[in-house]
């Protein structure tokens, strides 16, 4: 599904990713952990196509194609989804209108008709139930006045609506209380299948109790310095990042 | 697919500013016009041409006298070469052989013009319940749905016709809301107005359809001086729509309209405008100068709502206002004003509270792009006798790029202690992070800008009648997005 080879990226003149290698197969869940400033969010931004970051060398292959050659919206159409660490607010634009536009733009890219109102309503209903969301919230302005937890839940709601193939959840757990965390984790688990993949970016082992990763990677100074199974996350939780030294 | 270049605001702005005016073309309709310049003979000519009664001619001549003594105002935050008023043609009418009974009899050339504007008459006819009174180059060429309205006693016709047929009504109200000497441009308009619309809603009648007029300037170098008068009798209701487009020109065109609204006791008038006159080219050349005086008077329990979406004109000077004379009267102003390239707009409203318990709401949204300058200027005046009155004002500006300017000039005068006035103002920019967020969800940059701008204007767009809101959204896209469509 996704293969990252020797990826180096910088913002302005500062190198942040310094040779990342990562392979994600269909149906796998990968967790990427690491101390502050290790490059976790940069990695997710580069995969999503944020042009603030410049890729200086290396490659990203997605379903056999060069991902770096694709515009951000094309990556989205192809099934790449980023749950933002800091979702932006767009006043006056309703959640439902935003999601409808996103779904239809994707359909348009594949020469399909717009989604019917009936189909859309059914999807809204289904996914609202999945994430324990009040339908009233669909008519609110996108992220405007949302609490931190509501914003994160809204990201996962969009993920559920758009049914991506590769989801990157960038610190989705931060700002969630334990109840919300469980709801979000349940939602993500129910969206998991043998044909899609998930990359979890997190500081804490807490989330991994609910969404169990197949692989855990530790990113430090822009490189993956250690990989393992879920026990690596537990070790990290106990000992902190100091054991890496 | 190649990776797209960095979406900086500069690139976005280039796209935005590369959109040439879509409606820049001229129709080859023979026009009848007089020599340039303004004097008593010209005014007499116009009046005679229109077969006006003496009182109307006297009104015009008096206005001309007043105008000659006045000076063009220069307090607004706009810069433009002052027009040479002797270098303008003050009368011009498309030559037509006969009066039309139906829109189907319209000159095919004219019809094509409307088709190219995307507001084809066929479409308009299909659009539910819209009666259209088309004003092209100052003379109404067709009026529809008249009979249906006539059954209810509603009058909707060119003002020139009203002067002939309903002189007592016109005489009673014309110049009462906006006196001749109100300002330089209203005096000029009163002297030379060519045509416009007249609307009368009888007591207790709710007008069953939106009344609509499309204005269009079609002859190079002719000023257009429209005069509109809307009278809503006690307990009546009317929604009036006004939309405008103009062809591309190299020389500046002057437009100085006057719109007067009279809402008698418990009446309600909703007046909506979408304005898209030629704004000038990318270098600031050409474009319409728009100096409009619009004002309504509210008697007891009456309500007037002004809603406007302004995307056009090189220079705009416009303050649709309400005089809240009656007790419990309500005035509203909802506005979106877009400026791009070298456009300049000084626009806003005046809410003058005279009656007790009168209320007013002002929602003004400015969008500035390119090297344009947008100013909001608003007066809220609460007179001593207007006890327990309230005003809420919200003025927001959205900036695109760093070469444009947005200014707010609120004037607040409150002369009693029981009234309440609130004023809120914000300034924001379209962020790259907002655009990237949309991109990540599969929404391209142009569509993203449209979503963000429409979201920003939502409160105002929601006030427009449905079909007009669609047109307004289209206009916002055209004036801001460059390659959309």
Image (cartoon, rainbow, N blue to C red):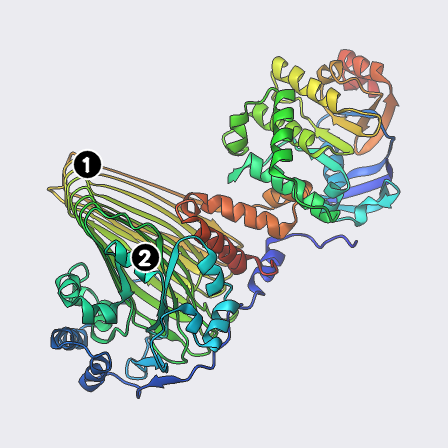
Q: Which mark is residue B148?
A: 2
Q: Quadrant of the C terminus of chain B?
A: bottom right
**Residue sitting at 14 percent across and 66 percent down?**
B171
Q: Nearer the viewer, residue A166 or B78?
A: A166
- Label 2 crowd (10 A; few <14 / some 14-19 / many >=20): few
Q: Can residue B119 be seen by looking at this rendering?
A: no
Position of residue A167 measured from the top left corner of the image (x, y, whole percent): 75, 31
Q: Position of residue B204 (x, y in %)?
A: 21, 46
Which quadrant of the figure has residue A135?
top right
Q: Which residue is mark 1?
A: B419
The residue at the far bottom in this view is: B35
Whole-percent x, y for residue A40 in the image: 74, 31
Q: Secondary structure at mark 2?
A: helix
Mark sitting on residue B207: none
* Residue A28, above or below A101: above
Do labels 1 and 2 touch, CB within 8 Å? no
Viewer-nearest residue: B84 or B206: B206
Q: Earlier in the sequence, mark 1 or mark 2?
A: 2
Specify the quadrant of the image occupied by residue B382.
Answer: top left
Q: Position of residue B337 (x, y in %)?
A: 41, 55
Q: Give B331 or A11, whichever is nearer the viewer.
A: B331
In this rendering, which labeled residue sits more in front, label 1 or label 2?
2
Q: Is residue B56 left or right of residue B18?
A: left
Q: Would you say B452 lies left or right of B164 here?
A: right
Q: Secondary structure at mark 1?
A: loop
Q: Is residue B433 above or below residue B92?
A: above
Could you tell me which chain the residue with mark 2 belongs to? B
CA gap, disc 1 and disc 2: 44 Å
Taking the image as drawn, is residue A156 in sight? yes
Q: Which residue is found at the position 13% from the left and 65% from the top?
A: B168
Above or below residue B274? Residue B329 is above
Chain identity of mark 1: B
């Amino acid at each position: 599904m996704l293969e990252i080879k020797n990826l180096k990226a910088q913002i302005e003149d500062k190198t942040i990713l310094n040779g990342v290698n990562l392979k994600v197969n269909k149906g796998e869940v990968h967790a990427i952990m690491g101390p502050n400033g290790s490059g976790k969010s940069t990695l997710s931004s580069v995969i999503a196509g944020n042009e603030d970051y410049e890729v200086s060398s290396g490659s990203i292959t997605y379903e056999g194609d060069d991902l770096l050659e694709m515009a951000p919206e094309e990556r989205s159409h192809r099934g790449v989804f980023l749950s933002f660490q800091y979702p932006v607010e767009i006043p006056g634009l309703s959640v439902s209108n935003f999601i409808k536009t996103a779904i239809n733009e994707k359909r348009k890219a594949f020469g399909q008709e717009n989604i019917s109102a009936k189909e859309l309503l059914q999807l809204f209903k289904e996914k609202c139930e999945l994430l324990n969301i009040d339908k009233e919230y669909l008519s609110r302005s996108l992220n405007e006045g949302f609490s931190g937890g509501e914003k994160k839940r809204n990201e996962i709601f969009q993920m559920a609506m758009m049914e991506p193939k590769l989801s990157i959840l960038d610190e989705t757990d931060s700002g969630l209380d334990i109840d919300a965390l469980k709801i979000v984790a349940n939602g993500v688990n129910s969206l998991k299948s043998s044909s899609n993949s998930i990359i979890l970016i997190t500081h804490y082992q807490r989330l991994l109790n609910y969404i169990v990763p197949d692989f855990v990677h530790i990113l430090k100074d822009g490189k993956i310095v250690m990989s393992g199974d879920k026990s690596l996350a537990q070790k990290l939780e106990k000992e902190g990042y100091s054991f890496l030294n | 697919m190649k990776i797209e270049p960095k979406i900086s605001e500069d690139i976005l702005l280039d796209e935005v500013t590369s959109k040439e005016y879509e409606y820049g073309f001229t129709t080859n309709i023979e026009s009848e016009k007089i020599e340039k310049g303004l004097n008593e003979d010209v005014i007499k000519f116009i009046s005679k041409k229109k077969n006006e009664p003496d009182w109307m001619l006297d009104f015009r001549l008096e206005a001309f006298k007043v105008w000659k003594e006045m000076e063009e105002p220069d307090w607004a935050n706009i810069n433009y070469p002052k027009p040479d008023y002797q270098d303008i043609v003050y009368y011009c009418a498309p030559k037509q052989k006969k009066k039309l009974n139906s829109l189907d009899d319209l000159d095919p050339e004219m019809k094509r013009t409307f088709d190219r504007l995307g507001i084809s008459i066929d479409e308009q006819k299909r659009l539910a319940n819209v009666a259209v009174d088309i004003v092209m180059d100052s003379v109404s060429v067709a009026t529809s749905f008249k009979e249906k309205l006539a059954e209810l006693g509603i009058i909707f016709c060119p003002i020139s016709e009203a002067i002939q047929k309903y002189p007592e009504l016109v005489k009673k109200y014309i110049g009462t809301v906006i006196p001749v000497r109100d300002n330089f441009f209203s005096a000029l308009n009163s002297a030379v107005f060519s045509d416009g619309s007249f609307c009368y809603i009888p007591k207790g009648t709710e007008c069953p359809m939106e009344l609509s007029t499309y204005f269009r300037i079609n002859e190079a170098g002719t000023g257009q001086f429209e005069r509109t008068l809307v009278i809503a009798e006690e307990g009546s209701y009317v929604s009036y729509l006004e939309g405008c487009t103009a062809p591309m020109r190299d020389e500046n065109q002057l437009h100085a309209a006057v719109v007067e609204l009279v809402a008698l006791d418990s009446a309600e008038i909703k007046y909506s405008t979408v304005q898209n006159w030629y704004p000038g080219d990318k270098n600031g050349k050409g474009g319409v100068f728009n100096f409009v005086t619009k004002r309504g008077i509210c008697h007891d329990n009456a309500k007037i709502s002004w809603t406007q979406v302004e995307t056009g004109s090189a220079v705009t000077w416009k303050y649709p206002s309400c005089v809240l004379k009656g007790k419990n009267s309500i005035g509203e102003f909802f506005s979106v004003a877009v400026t791009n390239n070298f456009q300049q707009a000084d626009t806003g409203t005046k809410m003058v509270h005279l009656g007790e318990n009168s209320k007013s709401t002002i929602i003004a949204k400015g969008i500035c792009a390119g090297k344009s300058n947008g100013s909001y200027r608003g007066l809220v005046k609460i007179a001593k006798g207007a006890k327990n009155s309230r005003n809420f004002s919200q003025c927001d500006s959205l900036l695109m790029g760093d070469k444009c300017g947005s200014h707010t000039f609120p004037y607040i005068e409150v002369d009693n202690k029981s009234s309440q006035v609130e004023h809120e103002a914000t300034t924001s920019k379209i962020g790259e992070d907002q655009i990237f967020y949309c991109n990540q969800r599969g929404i391209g940059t142009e569509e993203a800008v449209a979503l963000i701008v429409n979201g920003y204007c939502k409160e105002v767009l929601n006030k427009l009648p449905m079909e007009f809101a669609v047109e307004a959204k289209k206009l916002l896209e055209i004036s801001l997005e460059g390659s959309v469509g």
